[in-house]
Image (spheres, rainbow, N blue to C red):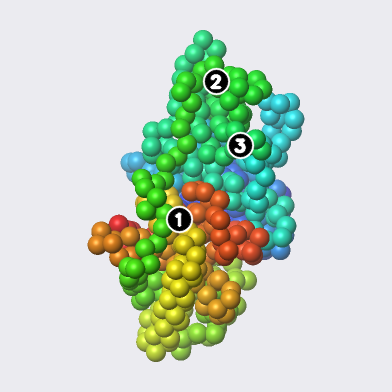
Amino acid sequence: MRGRIKFLDPKTGMWGFIVPEDAGRDAHFRLCDCLEPRPSSADADKPVEFELVEDAQGRHARNVRLLEPPAPATGGATLLVLGDALTTWAYVPFVPFKGRDGRQHASAVALLADIALNERWFFGDQPNPANPWPVLENYLTYTFLKLQREGNIVERASKAGTYAAFNTGLVDRLYDRIFALFESNPRPGYQKWRFCDFCVPGKGPSGKKLTSVFEPLPPAPTYFTSNFDMLLDTTKDIHVDHEHVILDAVARDRFPAAFLRQNSPRGVRWQEFPAMPGAERSAFLARVADAFNDDVQCLRGIKNRLEDATVLAEKRTKWNFKTAIPQYYPRHDIMSLLLPLCLTDDTVVDIALVVTRNPSGSYQGRTVLPLPWAYKNARLVSRPDSDWLTPNMIPPEEDRPEEEGEQLNVDNAV
């Protein structure tokens, strides 16, 4: 199918919408679903060709291809989108390809899912055919970023060629480590590296290639300096700038729609915003946030509910220390903890509160996250052993990758 790019989010450059030729609803697309050369925000209204996928969450464009040359970069250095670190460094097939094993695979992520120890890499009861492994794709993307920051993407020249590799942090069913192997890309003007295979040391041709080139093998990412970072000290206070957290979360679509509808401020004609197109929804939520700011009584009511939910979360943590779950913030390269907040029913977790430790030992509540984003951040560190943050208990997320990595306000970062 053909259409035109409506816009690419100028803030993150990670998502956008296409106006299809069939005059149907706009199709959402992610930058990682675009073929090279990828579009930028300057390519609005450019014609594209794409595959249309429709599901319960809406219309999605896959394998998006520009039909005209992309707009030239303007200004000096361009801002690197964190989620693009891997695909900027190397060509990775997020589309169907033939692997080194001679078989066809739906994508590199599908290959990794086949090799890794069995795990639920999606939310809800069934995977979304348009994106069956959203958790694993996020894991691979930001694990690479963490390793890159640590200087643990290892490159080696050998008699057999030039290779690069990194430790995925995952294991196979025998609990052997899985590595990503890359070879030098012979195509000029493209990424320096291209994906070769996922492999286990010494197993199969790729695993043998890995051990013949790399010694020692690349290390896994490091998230903790001590076990103290993994636990919430329940003897310390949690301080929350409720006004900032509430208004920011409303504008960023972090609260459940039902909760906002029950607590809607004066001066707003309520609309069922989850069904709105992205730009229209963002504009409506910005108006709602402004209305909350003007309606102090309503703002105070939500503040009281958040305080009650935080107290309940602290009690749960005192009862079971595993209630507080470590997570990694890719954008600010810091660790924090997630606490469950029950807003509409004390037995149902709606969102997660992000807390970081202050130098004094107390904690600062930074923001709130929808559960899919919370789980993705937590899974970067380890698979959560939790009674409240499990993928089967989280409804399938709406495809909104624009917020990934933008979850901590810079002014509040530590």
Q: Residue at x 74, y 33 (%)?
A: 104
Q: Is residue 9 above or below residue 290?
A: above
Q: Can you identify the residue that label 1 sits on?
A: 326
Q: Which residue is mark 3?
A: 175
Pointers 3 and 2 in contact (C-beta within 8 Å): no
Q: Amino acid at mark 1?
A: Pro
Disc with the residue nearer the chain's start (3 vs 2): 3
User: Marks 2 and 1, Cα distance to the nearest angstrom?
Assistant: 33 Å
The answer to whether residue 97 is left or right of residue 153 is right
Relative depth, front residue between 228 and 259:
228
- Which type of secondary structure does the marked residue at label 3 adopt? loop
**Residue at 71 percent of width and 63 percent of height:** 56
Q: Which residue is mark 2?
A: 211
Taking the image as drawn, is residue 50 in sight? no
Relative depth, front residue between 210 and 12: 210
Residue sitting at 30 percent across and 57 percent down? 414
Q: CA distance from mark 3 to mark 2?
A: 17 Å
Badge 1 element = strand
Q: Residues within 10 Å of mark 3 (few under 14, many from 20)?
A: few
Residue 408, numbered label: none
Q: Residue at x 66, y 51 (%)?
A: 120
